[in-house]
Amino acid sequence: MDEKQKYDVVIIGGGTSGCACAYNCAKNGLKTLLVEKNNFLGGLMTGGLVVPIMKSSINDINCDYYKKLIQVSKKYNAQITYKDGNDGWLNPELLKIILEDVLSFDNLDILFETSTESIIYEGSIIKSIILNSNLLSLPIEAQYYVDATGTAEFSILANCDILDSHDKKQQNSLRFILGNVNLEEFCSFIKKIDNNEDITNTYRDEINTNTELHFTTASTWDTLTHWALDKYLQQGVKDGILQESDRAYFQVFSIAGGLGQVAFNCPRIDNYKNNPYMSSKELINARKAIYRLYNFVKQYFPGFQNAIITNIATQTGVREQNRVKTKYVFTKDDLISSKTFNNPVLMANYSIDIHSDKKNGSILQKTSNYMLPIESLISANYENLFAIGKILGADFEAHSALRVQKSCMSMGEAVAKHITKMN
Ligand SMILES: Cc1cc2nc3c(=O)[nH]c(=O)nc-3n(C[C@H](O)[C@H](O)[C@H](O)COP(=O)(O)OP(=O)(O)OC[C@H]3O[C@@H](n4cnc5c(N)ncnc54)[C@H](O)[C@@H]3O)c2cc1C
């Protein structure tokens, strides 16, 4: 295919933020191409098994896509609204189908199993790119390019400046799901042992199903907090079933439309940013830890006796890796001081949330409402390149609050609206 295909906008990465951007570009009439290296959409929401969407946005700024996603997910029985009013509890496997439904537009092409081979630029303008789809080279020309890769792979290929976090890093996690769990039995057990509603709570979805029981609970090895489940994990370590590191962070949720399924936001693993050999070893360690945790819950938690491993994430849970230098780099001070900006991308209040490998090193710091400016999503190196989602231009601490899914979706939506105005 030698002739260049022409688009108004090309979005690289069909994950959390990229899908939001593609939806809004297409809805606004732009000829749009969405490029995804996996054979499904959703990124961390599907391949990473990251559920639920955290409550974060205030005032519904740039939440059209989020609302559409919730509305369509309801149609597939893949959504519940939890008792705290969070309607972002979705089913990660069904989302692969739902996202294709949401993104079905005549003016939107999706290319799966495709990555960028090269980028052709003149001065501060990206002119065209060559994609690689199953070893076939595809020349593409567009007015605007959006890096939604979650890794900044596109921006790095374009030689953009990347922000340095000076050895600060978040732990990664490899999430997994167990099936065939008796939720009634497990919920009556956790309710008896933990009355801290902030950590452990259950909810029967009477609005939709009248039967589905949901819950969330967690445990950490931090000594400053006393979470009820930890004594069971400590016992697991004493009995040789778990390793000490398995106690670091243990968090589980039920899944919308996933009867008898439980999603694990663990184990945590080390984040070797520039060492692929160590990163690969860590994935092997993570799967060993998953097997330990699986055997542990089967033996120690009522309801898990007949559990089976149904999913192990196909995308590693990388919380933070590369952030792109943008026209305005948003800082922790901006966030804490609730600095105001005209036409903000979002208004949110999700906490500063840093997962550390050290005991008592993790931070979950509540914040007031904060805004993000569009300039934090516009590349400092190219006029027609945007960076959205977890690669936005923010410092390490501000990033830890802004990286949640609803905020990433608002970033995609805001950039789509910005491009529409400029086009
Ligand atoms: C372990 C963990 C737990 C979390 N828990 C929560 C939670 O409970 N609630 C919440 O709201 N948020 C949570 N988050 C944060 C949130 O899930 C992410 O920050 C957010 O989903 C990132 O969205 P994104 O669009 O930047 O990246 P992604 O969703 O990862 O999307 C990136 C996409 O780009 C594709 N891609 C990458 N490179 C290329 C390429 N070269 N060419 C084409 N495609 C490419 C990938 O395959 C992927 O589909 C968690 C994150 C992690 C890691």
Image (spheres, grey):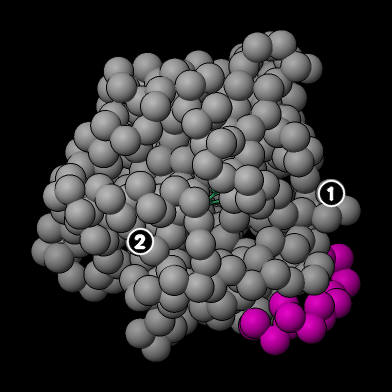
- Nearer-N-terminus badge (1/2): 1
Q: In which quarter of the image is the C terminus?
A: bottom right
**Residue 390 at x, y percent in the picture:** 52, 61
- The 10 Å Cα crowd at callout 2, few under 14, some 14 to 19, many 20 or more, is many
- Residue at (74%, 80%) from the top-left corner? 336
Is residue 359 something one can see in this rendering?
yes
Location of mark 1 (residue):
60
Which amino acid does the dot numbered 1 rest on?
Asp
Q: Name the main secondary structure of what is drawn in magenta.
A: loop
Q: Distance between the residues labelled 1 and 2?
A: 35 Å
- Residue at (38%, 74%) from the top-left corner? 359
Query: How many labels were placed on the picture?
Result: 2
- Residue at (77%, 45%) from the top-left corner? 63
For discs 1 and 2, the disc positioned in front in the rendered view:
2
- Tag 1, which secondary structure? loop
- Quadrant of the image occupied by residue 281: bottom left
Residue 221 or residue 376, whichever sits in front: 221
Asked if disc 1 and disc 2 are in contact, CB closer than 8 Å, the reply is no
- Residue at (56%, 36%) from the top-left corner? 192
Would the CB of label 2 be found within 8 Å of ligand 1?
A: no
Q: In this view, does 187 lie above or below 335?
A: above
Location of mark 2 (residue):
248
Q: For the magenta stretch, what is the residue range?
A: 331-345
Is residue 421 something one can see in this rendering?
no
Residue 363 or residue 373, whichever sits in front: 363
Residue 15 appears left or right of 203: left
Q: Is residue 133 above or below residue 119?
A: above
**Residue 135 at x, y percent in the picture:** 21, 39
Which amino acid does the dot numbered 2 rest on?
Ala
- Quadrant of the image occupied by residue 388: bottom right
Q: Is residue 249 above or below residue 371?
A: above
